[in-house]
Amino acid sequence: MTRLRFALLQAAHGSENTTRNFRRELDADLVEYDVTSGQLPDSTDGFDAVVVTGSRASVYWDEDWIEPLLDYVAQAADDGLAILGVCYGHQAVAEALGGRVADMDEFELGYTTVDRVGDDPLFSGIDDEFTVFTSHGDTVVQLPPGATLLAQNEYGIHAFRTGNAWGVQFHPEYDTKTARDIAEEKREILGDERVDEVLAEITPERFAAACEAKQLFDNFTEYVREMVESRAQVATT
């Protein structure tokens, strides 16, 4: 079979960590677009899926690149492409498809646990309670119409699905370097004590526990592969 081709909508302001992490975790050819600079694919043609990364931005900010990104995600969903949004991407997918995102008035940072809700192919092989790394001050407060809640914790919604589109609030793609870099960036808003506590918990043991959630990348890729194969069979009959 021809190798899968994903549009990687890079919203992390060109972060090398983000590029490295997604290229490591996704078994597909990734065509990367720096959406914060206004780059977007001309259409959804030629892609098997769309992946939207994390970002320092909020989906409700008045910045020129955000509305076109949301419009593209909505079009991709209309065109039947599989979509995976991570952190900011999770919020962008929710907003683009009719949900709502808001400031939490607090910040979730560091390793924590999340509870699954129900069953879904994206979480196949992942425990009902699993460890993840989080970094966000916004949250999805209203799911898109018809969406299904898939994971949550005390901070709110951590995963949902609507059609062939998924969002996950946590960061399954992070390695320990990224986790440390992100924590250091939060000193100004969270203070030294909070950040130092988070850094102390970035251990090989916590990272190993969080690696369980990386399974969702393989699950997403397999889902896309099955979609492509099914459509190819229909086209030849």
Image: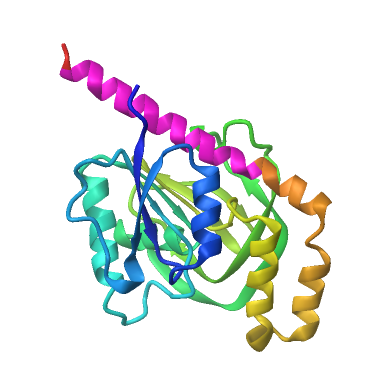
User: Is residue 142 in view?
Assistant: no
User: Of residues 209 and 11, which is closer to you in this image?
Assistant: 11
Q: Is residue 1 left or right of residue 118?
A: left
Which quarter shows the C terminus? top left
Q: Is residue 187 left or right of residue 196?
A: left
Q: Quadrant of residue 235?
A: top left
The image shows residue 215 at horizontal and vertical percentages of 59, 38
In the rendered view, would you say 27 is above or below 167?
A: above
The image shows residue 203 at horizontal and vertical percentages of 82, 57
- Residue at 26 percent across and 61 percent down: it is 40
User: Of residues 69 and 106, which is closer to you in this image?
Assistant: 69
In the rendered view, would you say 235 is above or below 109?
A: above
The image shows residue 45 at horizontal and vertical percentages of 19, 43
- Residue at 58 percent across and 57 percent down: it is 170
User: Of residues 75 and 51, which is closer to you in this image?
Assistant: 51
Which quarter shows the N terminus? top left
Chain part drawn in magenta: 213-235
In the rendered view, would you say 96 is above or below 225?
A: below
User: Is residue 217 in view?
Assistant: yes
